[in-house]
Amino acid sequence: WQTYYRGAVAYRVSEEPWFHVPGITELKLRYARGTAGDRTDLQASFGALSAPSPDPVPRDALGSRDLHPPRATEQEVGIDVVAFDRVSLQLSYVDQTTEDLVALALGGSSDAIVRNAGTMSGQTWEATLGARLIDRPGLRWSSTLVADRSRSRIDELDVPCYFTRNVVYCEGNSISDIWGGRFARSPEDLPAIHAGSLDAFQINDDGYLVPVGAGNSWRDGLRKDLWGTTITIDGINYAWGVPIEVTDSTGRPVFGKIGSSRPDVSLGWLNNLSWHGFDVHTVVHAQLGGQVYNYTRQLLYHPRRHGDLDQSGKPDERKKPVEYYEALYNDGDVSEPFLEDGTFVKLRELSVRYNLSEALLSRIGLGGLGADRAAIGIIGRNLLTLTDYSGFDPEVGGILQRYDLFSYPNTRTITGMVEITF
């Protein structure tokens, strides 16, 4: 059993007798607060046993009898303004805190337990600007622009930090952060032992710092038959011309935050146009910033099926062997080469509707059947996407994590409609 509540209050300042601001026809201050939750995994409340043989019967996990739903509390404050009965502005700030997050506390093979173990918070700013741009007989046009920006973080975590593929769950982190390895892109990424041998490395056309040896260039691969050879620099062996994974002082690959799926801002632009029986509605959606991890592209490197490996049409000095891309594949581990810009602009919806006049209804016989109104139209969704993302669709995964693992793209649909009202 869990009890939740919600409530809101608003103060219409413009209704006060002392309020006299020229042009401002509505001014409202508002506040709302509410709670919500989620169902917990019932199975996690019970211990788990496995029985590969009658004796002994090992325990797989402890049961968590005290497990209860996470509780989210959200507060919103805002201001609404209407000017000249034509232009409206809404500004909102939302603060949300989720307590008793469910996490897996790891122990030995028999005492892993799911329990309430953390707190996460998030903040959102949102602005909505609307206007009736044209409002006269036979022609009306209204437009609305929406912008929002959200951030979140884990404030408390009562279990040791843990990692799931590309997210590190730890206090201070955001679950929108993307974690993984990196490849050297500047001399600062090289081990300290190479401080006196920087002339043996060069940045190639892909932006990676690669070992080439003093006096050589990354362009010399085919001309001097250097691809496939090993070069020794300061006692360390490298595959010639192949990108170098960044390591720490012990030689272990560096694992850290490499990006974030959080956009800098999300935008929406809605338009409604009416003209002599025609109604046109458009929705444009845009995301500026934020990154997508293109795991689909990474996995296709291994069987040599991705277009990046096609060297046809390249000048000889820019051609790379399979070993080059195998290094970037990095055994399938999450790494920076497959992190891409998730910025996009989409024509989310376009609909055109024509409302038949009474004269036309009578002419085609619908008026005699008792029809009051009739309309025909067409609706298209996801018609156009503008983006530099190399996959099918940058809008993959969830809102918090843009992770492309052979994800099916958003479908484009075109629907016709006929509406008759009696």
Image (spheres, rainbow, N blue to C red):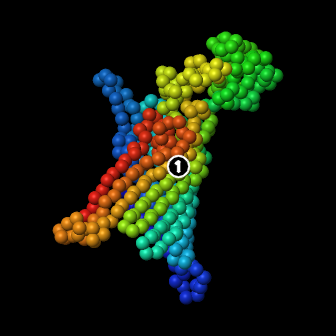
Decide which of 111, 274 is in the foreground and name it: 274
Residue 48: x and y in percent read: 36, 35
Residue 194: x and y in percent read: 77, 22
Quick one: SS at disc 1?
strand
* Residue depicted at 63% across the width and 31% down the height: 182
Decide which of 331, 162 is in the foreground and name it: 331
Classify 389 as above or below 214.
below
Residue 166: x and y in percent read: 54, 36
* Residue depicted at 64% across the width and 22% down the height: 315
Residue 276 occupies quadrant: bottom left
Relative side of 252 to 363, left or right? right
Q: Tell me if I can see residue 333 in this picture.
A: yes
Three-letter code for the amino acid on which mark 1 is drawn: Val
Relative side of 270 to 420, left or right? right
Classify 383 as above or below 190.
below
| Extreme residue in the front direction | 363
| Extreme residue in the right direction | 196
Q: Quadrant of the C terminus?
A: bottom left
Classify 86 as above or below 221.
below
Q: Quadrant of the N terminus?
A: bottom left
Label 1 crowd bin: few (<14), some (14–19), many (20+), radius 10 Å: some
Residue identified by numbered label 1: 345
Residue 149 occupies quadrant: bottom right
Q: Tell me if I can see residue 193 in this picture.
A: no
Decide which of 36, 47 is in the foreground and name it: 36
